[in-house]
Image (cartoon, rainbow, N blue to C red):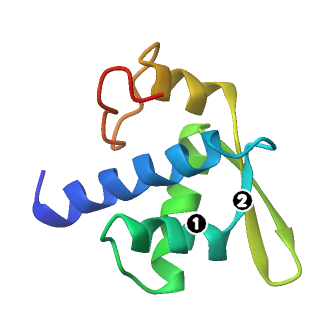
Amino acid sequence: MNFHEIVAADARLAILQALVREASRSHNEQLLQAALDAVGIVRARDYTRTQMRALESTGAVTLREAGDLLIATLTRTGLDHLSGRAIIDRVAQPEPGAL
């Protein structure tokens, strides 16, 4: 993997980790962008949307629109990745016991 692919994989993991910490398992793109900023992945809104759509394509999240915002909800597949029960290609692996 090249540097950009590694950053994207880390960004996708950070999105899943932000979702699992929320009781509803959902966040909008603005909150997820702030979560990426907090881990040093400072990118434009379109980058966050791209990573959210990549996660949707793997089944790790579902997406819905609310006005002009995307809202992501963690799925069982995403939770299984975070807990180490499954591996999702192109999503960084969490540290053991991180869930």
Which residue reaches farthest right?
67
Tag 2 near tag 1, CB within 8 Å: yes
According to the picture, the residue beneath numbered tag 1 turns out to be 32
The residue singled out by tag 2 in the image is: 27
Q: In this view, does 17 lie to the left or right of 61?
A: left
Horizontal placement of 91 versus 62: left or right?
left
| Crowding at mark 2 (Cα within 10 Å: few <14, some 14-19, many 20+) | many
Residue drawn 53% across and 45% down? 16
Residue 47: x percent and y percent?
45, 76
Residue sitting at the far left: 2
Residue 44 location, x and y as percent?
45, 86
Residue 37 coordinates in the image, percent (x, y): 41, 74
Question: Where on the picture, by quarter, is residue 60?
Answer: top right
Kind of residue at badge 2: His
How crowded pointer 1 is (Cα within 10 Å; few <14, some 14-19, many 20+) is rated as: many
Q: Is mark 1 on a helix, strand or loop?
A: helix
On screen, residue 62 versus residue 38, left or right, reads: right
Q: How many labels does the image show?
A: 2
3 shown above or below 16: below
Of all residues, the one furthest to the top in this rendering is 85
Q: Which amino acid does label 1 sit on?
A: Leu
Q: In the depicted view, which residue is nearer to us: 10 or 34?
A: 34
Disc 2 and disc 1: Cα gap in Å?
6 Å
Q: Which residue is drawn at 34% across and 33% down?
A: 94
Relative placement, left or right, of 18 versus 23 is left
Q: Up-down: is 74 above or below 98?
A: below
Kindly indicate the quadrant of the structure image that contains residue 70.
Answer: bottom right
Q: Residue 10 has which mark?
A: none
Residue 43, quarter of the rendered image: bottom left
Label 2: which secondary element: strand
